[in-house]
Image (cartoon, rainbow, N blue to C red):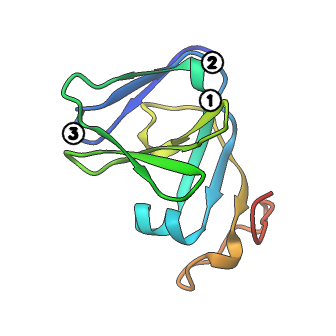
Amino acid sequence: MPPVEGGCLCGAVSYRVDGELRPVIGCHCSQCRKTSGHHVAATAADNAAIDVADPGEALRWYRSSSFAQRAFCSRCGSNLFWKRDDASYTAITAGTLNGPTGLRIEAHIFTADKGDYYTLDNDVPCFPASR
């Protein structure tokens, strides 16, 4: 896969992924809904494949649970990453990727927590909690 680039809305944080991206998973847990305003659609890559450029030190990590952190741009608020403490991969918010990616949604997780104001596509597997 050719390298993929992305970043936040204001451009203060950018990243490059030199490696394979996982298909997109839609997460409807209450934390993802709160950080995104809807739900999070995220791909993922091996930690070693992700190179983050943050010359102004705008990237902030927030400990959102006892086992994971979320990263966002402190200038524009863009939701960028989610990382489990013991994981070899980092989830990347799909909407922050530049250009066409060829990625597709593979599944929806934590659908038991989804908002009541929207429905889900029946063509994609849904899981009430994590897969």
Q: Residue at x 56, y 31 (%)?
A: 101
| Picture quadrant where residue 97 is located | top left
Which mark is first along the chain, 2 or 1? 2
| Amino acid at pointer 1 | Ala
What residue is drawn where x is 56% and y is 50%?
68
What's the residue type where badge 2 is placed?
Gly
**Does 45 sit above or below residue 111?**
above
Going from N to C along the chain, the mark reached first, 3 or 1, is 3
The residue wearing badge 1 is: 45
The label shown at residue 10 is 3
Q: Quadrant of residue 23?
A: top right
State which quarter of the image contains the C terminus: bottom right
**Residue that lies at the very extreme toward the bottom in this rendered image:** 116
Q: Quadrant of the N terminus?
A: top right
CB-based contact (under 8 Å), mark 1 and mark 2: yes
Residue 19, disc: 2
Q: Pointer 1: residues within 10 angstroms few (<14), some, or many (20+)?
A: some
Give the amino acid type for the residue marked by disc 3 in the picture.
Cys
Residue 112, position as x, y percentages in the image: 70, 78
